[in-house]
Image (cartoon, rainbow, N blue to C red):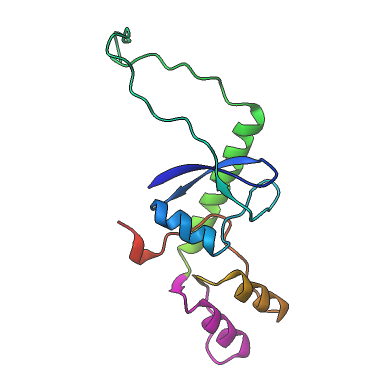
Amino acid sequence: MIVFDLKCRAEHVFEAWFASSMAFEDQKARGLLLCPVCGDTGIDKAVMAPNVAAKGNQHLDPISHEAPAVMAPPSPEAAAMVAVMQKLAEVQAEAIKTSTWVGKDFERQARAMDAGDVDQAQIHGQATPEQARAMMEDGIGVMPLLIPVIPPEERN
């Protein structure tokens, strides 16, 4: 897993986890990235500070043997946003446990359920933004997952 700081066109900065850089690029190309603050889909990577190891001549903490961290505490707003995102991720993960991954066959299966051709079931999978809009316009009860899901075949 890799974490990126992301930024929308309104300059909201947030972080997201991806299986790889390729997974980020794929989700961006398919319009699946969404600003959690304003809903903007114009998302790019934000500038991130590099993770630089401490200099060899720095004094280390005698207990942990690590260089002391110098970091500003998170703002109350940032801490609240992290708590909200963690709760969303927990609720979504719980819901997905009772759902079946159907991958790119999502639209076909959702439409078949809506038409009564197959039994109703909870499913999740992949759809383009256009497919999702079309299903919603047709009154099919679908909604995007708020936290990106790594397809089972792409997990390590």
Q: Nearer the viewer, residue 102 or 4?
A: 4
26 vs 141: above or below: above
Tell me if residue 31 is in the magenta stretch: no
| Number of numbered discs overlaid on the protein picture | 0
* Residue 27 place in picture, x, y as percent: 50, 60
Tell me if residue 112 is in the magenta stretch: yes
Residue pictured at 61% horizontal, 69% vertical: 129
Residue pictured at 42% horizontal, 59% vertical: 150
Task: In the displayed orientation, state which residue is furthest to the bottom.
Answer: 117
* Residue 107 place in picture, x, y as percent: 55, 79
Residue pictured at 47% horizontal, 75% vertical: 104
Image quadrant in which you'd find residue 14? top right
In this picture, residue 121 sits left or right of residue 69: right
* Residue 39 place in picture, x, y as percent: 68, 53
46 vs 50: above or below: below
For the record, the magenta segment spans 100-122
Q: Nearer the viewer, residue 46 or 84?
A: 46
61 vs 91: above or below: above
